[in-house]
Image: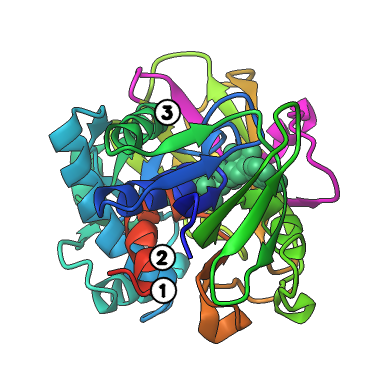
Amino acid sequence: MSFDTDVVIIGAGIAGLATGYATSRRGLETVIIEQEAGIGQGVSSRNSEVIHAGIYYPARSLKAKLCVAGKQMLYAFCDKHRVPYSRCGKLVVATTTEEEPRLDAILAQGLANGVDDLQRLSGDEVRSLEPHLKATAAILSPSSGLVDSHALMLMLGGEITRHGGAIAVNTPFAGATPLEGGGFVVRTAGEAATELTTRYLVLAAGLGAQAAAARVDTYPAEKIPQRHLGKGVYFSLAGKAPFERLIYPLPIPGALGTHYRRDLGGQARFGPDLDYVDTLDYEVDPARAASFYDTIRRFWPDLPDDALVPDYAGIRPKIHGPDQPQCDFRIEGTDQHGLAGLVAMFGIESPGLTSSLAIGELTVKRLALA
Ligand SMILES: Cc1cc2nc3c(=O)[nH]c(=O)nc-3n(C[C@H](O)[C@H](O)[C@H](O)COP(=O)(O)OP(=O)(O)OC[C@H]3O[C@@H](n4cnc5c(N)ncnc54)[C@H](O)[C@@H]3O)c2cc1C
């Protein structure tokens, strides 16, 4: 049977674009379907833009493997395509001696994950790098950094079209039906509602992952994990950025904790916190500043009063609730859901941006195209 295209990808966030880059580079005709008016308007537009080293995640988890591999691929891609980034490094800090055993456990986890450039620093060594930072000890991660995520997504989109692929915006995915003998009919909604046949289908729909999977006929409902919305807000700093490097206190349950970054334009920002919500509401409640002052002053006692300005919010596409252990990425192929030629992604929260290029390669493998 001949198909209209080789691959249809639902979602032009960083995961869908990185997958489209992987498929189109292999000569597969690729069409990305995006409901918004442009690429990268979902979770990928509301994050910290941190290139994570791969320190925290359980050994052999997809998060650990794809973050460590994805980081290297990302730096190489940015070098090759002149995407702005900074390998600024990061300090994970213990602010009291009681926190140091947890810091050491994080160091051991990072080393087990293959992050081999980590260094443990004393309080004095920390102060020689960042004089205003309060820490009794820290882990220095030289390979952590920041990337201009929008420039990255634009570049990936450009590479996809250069390799003959297409990105259809304003095009909501309405559903898909597996064809006898392989492949799918994909239906889109909106003004230019249409149908097309494809050999392979990839669901990379971020916060819409569960709804997208439910629209694929015969996708087993029990294989669709429940969606939880993990909102995080950011505050920017009115004033000069106090640190060069990323500063992370110890992680909180379910997230890495409110951290500091000086973005590529020089603006200092703090966030995100974690609050489970029921709706996609991106308001930043100024009242949340109180807990930010407390958290930040543990590692930066000089934070002046009234210096934090409400900035923006992001929502993590979580697949675990507040009292459940943090889940791994789910990038599921035939073995998991039983449908040949389909990969579905769920729970692509942090470090999804860092891992994106490795997620694309894994998806190609799951489709047996590698
Ligand atoms: C607050 C926060 C901070 C983060 N910080 C970092 C960080 O510093 N470093 C890091 O590595 N990761 C970070 N992440 C994680 C990272 O941002 C995500 O893993 C990544 O952006 C997810 O990309 P995605 O393509 O899966 O989702 P998205 O970017 O949401 O893309 C999915 C796309 O699918 C589209 N879509 C959905 N449904 C349909 C449909 N029915 N039809 C058509 N299109 C559809 C959406 O419009 C969207 O464009 C953070 C996340 C959050 C929320």
Is residue 327 in view from this perspective?
yes
Amino acid type, residue under disc 1 in the picture: Arg
Q: Residue under label 3, please give it.
A: 150
Would you say 50 lies left or right of 88 here?
A: right
Q: Which of label 3 and label 2 is nearer to you?
A: 2
Badge 3 or badge 1: first in the primary sequence:
3
Looking at the rendered structure, the secondary structure element under dot 2 is helix
Number of the label disc, if any, that sits on residue 363: 2
Q: Nearer the viewer, residue 361 or 150?
A: 361
Q: Nearer the viewer, residue 113 or 203?
A: 203
Residue 230 highlighted magenta (yes or no): no
Q: CA distance from mark 2 to mark 1?
A: 5 Å
The crowding category of the residue bearing disc 3, from other C-alpha atoms within 10 Å (few below 14, some 14 to 19, many at least 20), is some
Q: Is the C-beta separation of discs 3 and 1 under 8 Å?
A: no
Residue 265 highlighted magenta (yes or no): yes
Q: Is the C-beta separation of discs 2 and 1 under 8 Å?
A: yes
